[in-house]
Image: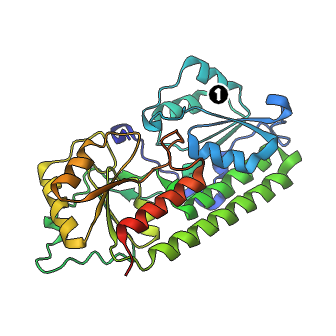
């Protein structure tokens, strides 16, 4: 993720309105379902929002993603064809601050409905190290103070990875469902029903995570970059990222040395990498510290390398990887 281009979001005060302040309509009747085949034509900025919109919209929507599978969404550049597609759509669902090119295109487009997912839940600032409320993170003898432990938050910024927390993702789902119902009132009942179904499924996933991660032997895990901060906080874990929020940045030698010490002190067994960014640094760290490696998927897109075919299956694969690495008491 190119966080050097991340745009901080500052619309949290609107969250109480279920994000509907991020929605604009063209009058009381709002959009008619005049998209493909009479369906509401919706453009989603990348996979998590595409999946969510498809689940809620069902047969009443035609959803197109601006980000192709296998493409890093953070570095997306929008083509002229995509810009035209966006301008002709009935609605767009995006996450302001994640993809600057999308933000710019949405701002310029004369769209009937604009839904900004960042206004539908609370956004937080995360850096290299993100600790959950229940994470002990107590080191053994020779414990070092955090200030001397290399946990600088110099790369901290509004963390866009809200979809990796099922609870926050459910909050986004509720806002998107309300937006679609307002844009296409003729099918509002179906949107509401589908939203409730999705929220229930996400609630089940949250319970699975909570139960599986409650009594793990270790509570600290290492990742390529800080994509799992919300997840760590939700389930009482501590994520230590090699490169902070930006996987393209090179970690300092001091950071690598610190991670090696921390891994030994906290009983870390595994360094997680992801499929869309280089695994070189993660595997070097793992080799030097005699640790295993495994994939923890930030779910920015589904490809043939994904350990699952959709959001739920990949999230469950991630849970298996986490519980295996953290162990049981």
Number of marks: 1
Question: Is 43 placed left or right of 69 in the picture?
Answer: right
Residue 304 against residue 161 in the figure, above or below = above
> Does residue 116 show up?
no
- On the image, the x and y values in percent for residue 263 come to 22, 65
Question: Is 68 placed left or right of 187 in the picture?
Answer: left
Q: Residue at x 78, y 43 (%)?
A: 183
Q: Residue at x 78, y 48 (%)?
A: 182
- On the image, the x and y values in percent for residue 157 come to 36, 51
- On the image, the x and y values in percent for residue 74 come to 44, 37
Question: Is 10 placed left or right of 254 in the picture?
Answer: right
Q: Residue at x 57, y 37 (%)?
A: 45
Mark 1: give few (<14), some (14-19) or many (20+) Cα within 10 Å. Answer: many
* Residue under numbered circle 1: 86
Q: Nearer the viewer, residue 200 or 274?
A: 274
Q: Nearer the viewer, residue 258 or 291?
A: 291
Please name the colour scheme applied to the rendered image: rainbow
> Residue 85: which quarter of the image?
top right
Question: Is 34 placed left or right of 148 in the picture?
Answer: right
- Quarter of the picture holding the C terminus: bottom left
Residue sitting at the far right: 186
- On the image, the x and y values in percent for residue 303 come to 52, 39
Q: Residue at x 32, y 50 (%)?
A: 224
- Quarter of the picture holding the N terminus: top left
Q: Nearer the viewer, residue 24 or 327?
A: 327
Residue sitting at the far top: 80
> Does residue 256 show up?
yes
Q: Under tag 1, what secondary structure?
A: helix
Residue 62 against residue 123 in the figure, above or below = above
């Amino acid at each position: 993720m190119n966080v050097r281009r991340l745009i901080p979001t500052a619309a949290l005060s609107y969250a109480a309105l279920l994000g509907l302040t991020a929605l604009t309509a063209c009058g009381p009747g709002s959009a008619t379902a005049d998209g493909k085949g009479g369906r509401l034509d919706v453009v989603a900025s990348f996979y998590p929002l595409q999946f969510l919109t498809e689940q809620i919209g069902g047969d009443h929507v035609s959803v197109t993603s601006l980000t192709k599978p296998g493409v890093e969404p953070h570095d997306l550049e929008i083509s002229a064809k995509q810009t035209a597609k966006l301008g002709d759509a009935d609605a767009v669902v995006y996450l302001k601050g994640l993809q600057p090119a999308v933000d710019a295109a949405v701002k310029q487009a004369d769209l009937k409905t604009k839904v900004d997912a960042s206004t539908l839940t609370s956004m937080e600032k995360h850096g290299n190290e993100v600790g959950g409320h229940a994470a002990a993170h107590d080191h053994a003898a020779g414990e070092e103070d955090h200030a001397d432990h290399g946990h600088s938050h110099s790369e901290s910024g509004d963390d866009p990875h809200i979809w990796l927390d099922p609870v926050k993702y459910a909050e986004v789902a509720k806002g998107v469902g309300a937006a679609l119902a307002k844009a296409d009132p003729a099918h509002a009942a179906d949107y509401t029903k589908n939203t409730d179904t999705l929220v229930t499924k996400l609630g089940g996933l949250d319970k699975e995570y909570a139960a599986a991660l409650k009594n793990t032997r270790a509570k600290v895990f290492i990742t390529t970059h800080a994509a799992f901060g919300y997840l760590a906080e939700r389930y009482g874990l501590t994520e230590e990222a090699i490169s902070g929020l930006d996987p393209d940045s090179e970690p300092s030698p001091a950071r690598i040395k610190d991670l090696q010490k921390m891994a030994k002190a906290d009983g870390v067994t595994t360094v997680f990498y992801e499929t869309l960014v280089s695994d070189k640094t993660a595997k070097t760290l793992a080799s030097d510290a005699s640790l295993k490696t495994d994939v923890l998927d930030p779910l920015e897109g589904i490809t043939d390398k994904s350990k699952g075919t959709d959001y739920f299956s990949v999230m469950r694969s991630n849970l298996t990887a986490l519980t295996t690495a953290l162990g049981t008491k």
